[in-house]
């Protein structure tokens, strides 16, 4: 079974179970201050998990593009990836544990035809906040999963959320597949045995965590599931390496050709490499792992570039640059030159069902080539700095090594290599200490940049959210209709709004925009929510965010104003939350107007 077949079977199965199929949301989250990228299928659905009514009903399913950078250092093994696709089905206050588990089992056993003998599950063991999940265990047993194959695990393994400090959360139940073909699965399930591969996770959102840290039964109980496409395709095809599946194989073949190195596809090829190279472990470290890193990072970079993000020194641009430079560095170690556009080519074929790749192909390839050239020049400067730092020295400090890493993208391996050539010692322990600090900062940047969580529907956030609608329209009134929203980010302290415009605003223009918003606030305009087909929303004049994908039925928020031409001032496709009258917003104040990226400006503002 290949990638497209799995996705088709999954979506068809849940469509037959009365789930509405929605498109993958952007990799860049809308109105979520906690993450740089969409890291799970549930991110775009958070407002509905919190109780907002979804235009398409209470049952939803999709395949969602995701980027995770928290475990970037683990990329290089057979199954960790920066970019991946997540299949998911949701119940928004409809079915719960029994139906969710039964549907999961039916899909695995009947649709994918996985023998029960190769399946095992884990459930929540319970703690002071919530009881042992014997209910889920009994449901699994009723479906034929023996109790020896059900493991009770703690909060670190079988509990989800909340995403922020407060909000929906609950136990989860995970499904595992025995990956070995030449050895039957043991009778008893041992979660620590790496031959058991997790392929699906059902989150049972049973509780709401409040400000005091208490876990209360949720009025709306939700189901949130996730199945990784790459990992599932791999195990279904009897493989033990994701890079041999159709999600990666065409990319690996190009890397093999460009590097003139062999990536082993089976035991016979592994044995041939062992015979040719005395030390297989060294070959794996020097060739196989770099090949995987290059394939993973180039693929992820192509996907990020398709969202109109370009390499830079902050936020998503910084992550993109880091991925590309890491890939380029490993490419150099394999003797590859000017290779990034060529390695990227198969990505467009593998994911030809994402139109943003087709539409932005030329720009993506251009950005890859430019960043590779730029980094090659940076490497030269880095080598010159290394020579300067190491001149007349017997040892290089960890801080100097980290300077090379941070400023010039020099990984430890390159500094080690240069030091060895020049017979200079390095303080690796001090470097790792500095690097650990950097990792913690990077993790914070990519996973939780602000204190407020996904569950933050506070009064202040709600006021700021509605203010972005007024700001969006005010910018068009002052600057012209060519202004389009390119993204927003809201915390309880401020809003940040990105829009297409090719120059800095004058002080007078900033003042005019601010006054325009405050004038509309003072009029006490009604904010009305309607649900309608997407085509109708667009034809009625509703604004949509650039690059965003929407389901066939959407929520539209209209800020009424009888004095305006159409009887409204602002109309946008949005998921909320919003005030009911603009007077609730308070006084609007622009704090800063600045550049975000080429052709995109950014406004930061607050309300009092």
Image (tube, rainbow, N blue to C red):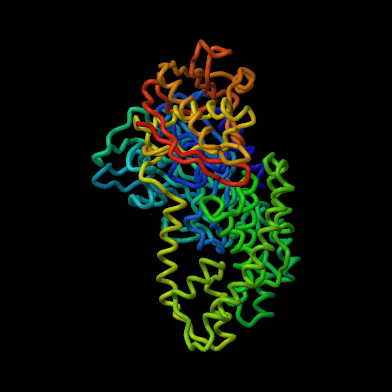
Nearer to us in this view, 266 or 476: 476
- At 45% from the left and 20% from the top, the residue drawn is 520
Q: Residue 284: where, in percent of width, then height?
A: 60, 72
- At 73% from the left and 61% from the top, the residue drawn is 253
Residue 139, can we see it? no
Identify the residue at the far front of this view. 508
349 relative position to 326: left or right: right
Instruction: Quadrant for residue 443, please give it.
Output: bottom left
Q: Residue 603: where, in percent of width, then height?
A: 49, 38
- At 65% from the left and 45% from the top, the residue drawn is 306
The relative height of residue 259 versus residue 136 in the rendered view (above or below) is below
The relative height of residue 500 versus residue 597 in the rendered view (above or below) is above
Nearer to us in this view, 333 or 422: 422
Residue 288, can we see it? yes
- Quadrant that contains the C terminus: top left
Q: Residue 203: where, in percent of width, then height?
A: 42, 40
Instruction: Quadrant for residue 278, please give it.
Output: bottom right
The relative height of residue 318 versus residue 203 in the rendered view (above or below) is below
Nearer to us in this view, 3 or 586: 586
Instruction: Quadrant for residue 500, please give it.
Output: top right
């Amino acid at each position: 079974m290949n990638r497209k077949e799995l996705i088709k079977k999954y979506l068809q199965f849940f469509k037959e179970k009365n789930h509405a199929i929605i498109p993958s949301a952007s990799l860049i989250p809308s109105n979520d201050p906690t993450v740089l990228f969409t890291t799970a299928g549930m991110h775009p659905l958070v407002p509905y998990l919190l109780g907002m009514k979804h235009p398409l009903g209470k049952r939803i399913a999709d395949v969602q593009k995701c980027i995770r950078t928290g475990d970037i250092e683990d990329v290089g093994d057979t199954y960790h990836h920066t970019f991946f696709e997540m299949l998911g089905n949701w119940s928004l206050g409809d079915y719960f544990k029994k139906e969710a588990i039964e549907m999961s089992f039916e899909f695995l056993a009947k649709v994918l035809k996985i023998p029960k003998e190769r399946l095992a599950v884990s459930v929540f063991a319970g703690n002071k906040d919530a009881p042992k999940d014997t209910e889920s265990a009994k449901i699994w047993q009723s479906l034929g999963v023996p109790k020896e194959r059900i493991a009770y695990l703690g909060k670190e393994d079988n509990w989800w959320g909340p995403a922020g400090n407060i909000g929906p959360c609950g136990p989860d139940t995970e499904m595992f597949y025995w990956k070995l073909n030449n050895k039957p699965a043991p009778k008893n399930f041992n979660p620590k045995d790496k031959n058991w591969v997790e392929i699906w996770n059902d989150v049972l959102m049973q509780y709401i965590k409040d400000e005091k840290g208490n876990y209360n039964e949720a009025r709306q109980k939700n189901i949130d599931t996730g199945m990784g496409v790459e990992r599932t395709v791999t195990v279904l095809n009897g493989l033990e390496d994701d890079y041999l599946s159709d999600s990666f194989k065409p990319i690996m073949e190009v890397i093999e050709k460009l590097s003139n190195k062999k990536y082993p596809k089976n035991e016979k090829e592994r044995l041939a490499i062992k015979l040719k190279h005395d030390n297989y472990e060294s070959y794996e470290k020097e060739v196989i792992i770099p090949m995987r890193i290059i394939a993973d990072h180039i693929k992820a970079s192509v996907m990020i570039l398709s969202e109109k993000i370009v390499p830079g020194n902050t936020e998503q641009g910084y992550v993109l640059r880091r991925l590309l430079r890491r890939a380029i560095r490993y490419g150099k170690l394999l003797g590859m030159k000017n290779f990034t556009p060529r390695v990227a080519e198969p990505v467009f074929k593998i994911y030809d069902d994402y139109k943003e790749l087709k539409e932005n192909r030329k720009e993506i390839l251009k950005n890859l080539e430019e960043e590779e050239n730029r980094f090659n020049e940076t490497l030269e400067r880095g080598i010159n700095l290394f020579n300067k730092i190491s001149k007349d020295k017997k040892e290089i400090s960890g801080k100097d090594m980290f300077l090379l890493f941070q400023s010039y993208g020099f990984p430890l391996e390159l500094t080690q290599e240069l030091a060895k050539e020049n017979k200079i010692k390095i303080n690796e322990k001090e470097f790792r200490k500095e690097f650990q600090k950097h990792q913690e900062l990077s993790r914070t940047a990519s996973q939780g940049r602000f204190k407020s969580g996904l569950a933050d529907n506070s009064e202040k956030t709600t006021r700021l959210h509605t203010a972005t609608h007024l700001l969006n329209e005010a910018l068009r009134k002052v600057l012209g209709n060519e202004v389009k929203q390119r993204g927003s980010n809201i915390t309880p302290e401020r809003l940040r709004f990105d829009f297409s415009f090719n120059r800095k605003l004058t002080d007078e223009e900033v003042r005019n925009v601010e006054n325009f918003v405050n004038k509309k606030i003072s009029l006490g305009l009604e904010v009305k929510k309607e649900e309608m087909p997407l085509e109708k929303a667009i034809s009625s004049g509703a604004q949509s965010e650039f690059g965003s994908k929407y389901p066939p039925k959407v929520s539209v928020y209209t800020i009424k104003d009888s004095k305006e031409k159409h009887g409204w001032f602002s109309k946008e496709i949005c998921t909320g939350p919003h005030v009911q009258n603009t007077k609730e917003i308070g006084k609007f104040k622009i704090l800063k107007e600045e550049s975000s990226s080429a052709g995109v400006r950014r406004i930061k503002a607050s309300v009092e």
